[in-house]
Every structure is written in structure tokens, then in C-alpha cells.
Image (cartoon, helix red, strand yellow):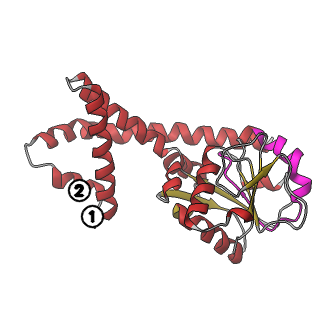
Amino acid sequence: MIRRLWLVGCGTMAGAMLRRWIESGALAPGDVFVANRGDRALPEGVAQGRALPEGPPPDAVLLGVKPQQLDAAAEAHAARLTGVPLLISILAGVETDAVAARFAAGAVVRAMPNLPVALGKGVVALDGAVSDAARGAVEALMRPLGLVEWVERFDLVTALAGSGPAFLYRFIDALAVAGTRLGLPAGQASRLALATVEGAAALAAAAPVSPGALADQVASPGGSTRKGLDVLDDDQALVELLVATLRASEARNREMAAAARG
């Protein structure tokens, strides 16, 4: 069980995870310490500083710096973290071996959350050759954040689930822009697009059938929805666009992994 946690770096993603853990009661503020290059707005009761505190190590450490800051973080904190039972890295494109080469932790787990973890509606992909006890501890820590999955194709899952919210935000904006170009007021089109996606996602999550089946249920033969779907389905236009999107994101993750390996 992870009760005491240190964070090395606490940017947007690590901060979202931390706030959710505190709000859900998974962690107590007094059991968390954040080492940052500068002070950030953190949940009340969470201590922070430039260096990690003295005393016994915590149950786990979350490495939440930017990938290009890995070496700087290791130089600043690796000695202090020697022997920490569990190190969890959320560095995009950085493999567990690259982290283990810089930090002498008992076990290293790679995690890739996405931003909806802030609401407990996120996805957290996990990878790491660790003991069953470590797997259970990491899963228990991540569960308040949303869906937790151990994966093999980590760079691809990072592209789909980690970067996926950004792609969906683009879709929402594009849906609104399309409505505006065809004559709707911009503000109204934005509100309608956002509410439509929010409601559709909630319904899809609760439905006993696939999203594709839901689309077919909405689309009456010869109706307006079917005509619109015909555009998206023609030569699998939407699928091919997303394949290209995920392929580009996955390739960049591999490039970052190669850079971290040195």
C-alpha cells in the first residue's frame, strides 16, 4: 500500500494526479512532498521545496518532470532516492530501463495518464517488470484516477490514450468551426459541440453496445445522419486520418525513448 509519496516535478499532469489523490482520500496531504524548481499552487497541506526531505524514504516516488529534464532530475535527486522501494515515471517516451539506469530504486514502473485523471475519468497505462506486490500497490494508487491497464505497446497506447484527449479537443473545435462556417454563431456552435460530445461520450460509456453500433442506431436509412456518416466512412476517411495521427505520435514517442537511452 502506498501511503507516503514524494513527487519530483509537479507540472500539469502530475498536479492533476496529485489533486485527484488528495480529493479522493487516496493520499493525505501531510504524507506528500513535492520537489520542484519553483513553488507551485498545490493542495493545502502538501509540502514542497527544492530538495527532498531527510529521513526514511517514502513508499513510492513519482517522477513527473519533462522528458528532457530526466538527467537534471537524476543529478539533483538520484543519490537521495537510492533504495526507494518504488519509482513511478510519467515521462512520455522514456522507457523503464532508461529510468532504472539513472535511479537505483527497488522497482521502476512506467505510467502514462491522460488529463481526465483530474476528474477520476482518465486512463492510466502501466508497464514494468515488477513483483505482484508492486503491481498491486501501483494499481491501488492509480485506481482513483480512472481506468488502469497494464499494456505492452506502450508508445502506441501513449498515442491513443495519453495524447487522445488533445485529439478529441481538436475534433470538438473542428465540429464547432464547421457549424460556424455554415452559419451558426461561433459561441453557440462551441456550446453545442461541447455538450454534444460530452453527452455522447457519457452515453457510449454506459451503453451495452459499441460506439459504432450506437452510430448506426442514430442513423436512419436515407436520413441526414447517414448522409453525414457516409462522408466520414468513405474510403474509411476518418479511420485513416486517425491511423496517421496515432502513427505520428507513436513515432515521436520512439524518438524520445531513443534519446533517453543515449
Amino acid type of disc 1?
Val
Residue sitting nearer the eye, 13 or 160: 13
Q: Position of residue 120 (x, y in %)?
A: 49, 60
CA–CA distance between discs 2 and 1? Answer: 7 Å
Residue sitting nearer the eye, 121 or 213: 121
Residue located beneath label 1 in the image: 209
Which numbered circle lies on residue 214?
A: 2
Magenta-colored stretch includes residue 133: no
Label 2, secondary structure: give it: helix
Contact flag, marks 2 and 1 (Cβ < 8 Å): yes
Q: Which callout, 2 or 1, points at the residue further toward the start of the chain?
A: 1
Q: Is residue 242 above or below residue 8?
A: above
Image point 29% across, 26% down: which residue?
186
Image point 56% across, 62% down: which residue?
23
In the image, taking residue 59 as reference, residue 234 lies left or right, namely left
Q: Position of residue 137 (x, y in %)?
A: 67, 72
